Amino acid sequence: MRRNTALALSLALPLALAACGTPQERCIDRNTSEYRTISALLAEVEGNLARGYSWQERQVVRTRFEQCRRVYRDRDGQQHVTTYGCWRDYVDSERYRVPIDPAAETRKRDGLEARQAALSGGARAAVSACREAFPEEA
């Protein structure tokens, strides 16, 4: 991998719980979101190139046999519950392989690397500014 893994990790790890994080973590999250998005896309493209295919997901409706309940009242008004076997539909997600065009993926990777390199200076400066503005207390 050719990307700056150390910077990506230093930006991603403190942001695991950014929504409920410290003011410093929220500041870093706000100011580095594009860099983190580009880094995630780059990691996906590099994985596709390494495997030779990409993954996609689709929704599939499947049927399974379950125990269903039926409540009925007898002539005296008493409730009775019976169980019986029935078929129920449910939606499942299924991953499948999609072939890739290596030349197109390589161009995509090169474009993402260039964009990441352009954003890395700003991301580094934003992280430094957030750490100065919101110092963490030990």
Image (cartoon, grey):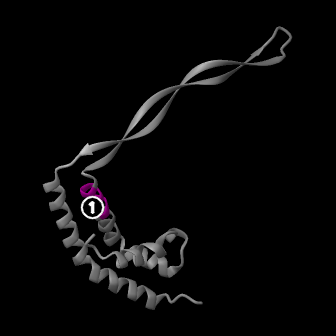
Q: Which residue is found at the position 54% from the left and 87% from the top? A: 136
Q: Is residue 126 above or below residue 19?
A: below
Label 1's element?
helix
- In which quarter of the view is residue 57 placed? top left
- In which quarter of the view is residue 49 placed? bottom left
Magenta stretch mostly in which secondary structure?
Answer: helix
Question: How far across and how far down the image is residue 1, in percent?
Answer: 28, 69
Magenta residues (range): 43-50
Question: How far across and how far down the image is residue 83, in percent?
Answer: 71, 19
Q: Nearer the viewer, residue 120 or 33?
A: 120
Q: Which residue is found at the position 22% from the left and 70% from the top? A: 113
Q: Which residue is found at the position 40% from the left and 39% from the top? A: 94
Compared across the picture, whether 9 is left or right of 107 comes to: right
Compared across the picture, whether 72 is left or right of 63 comes to: right
Amino acid type, residue under disc 1 in the picture? Glu
- In which quadrant is the C terminus drawn? bottom right
Q: Is residue 32 above or below residue 125?
A: above
Residue that badge 1 annotates: 46
User: How many marks can you see?
Assistant: 1
Q: Nearer the viewer, residue 5 or 127?
A: 5
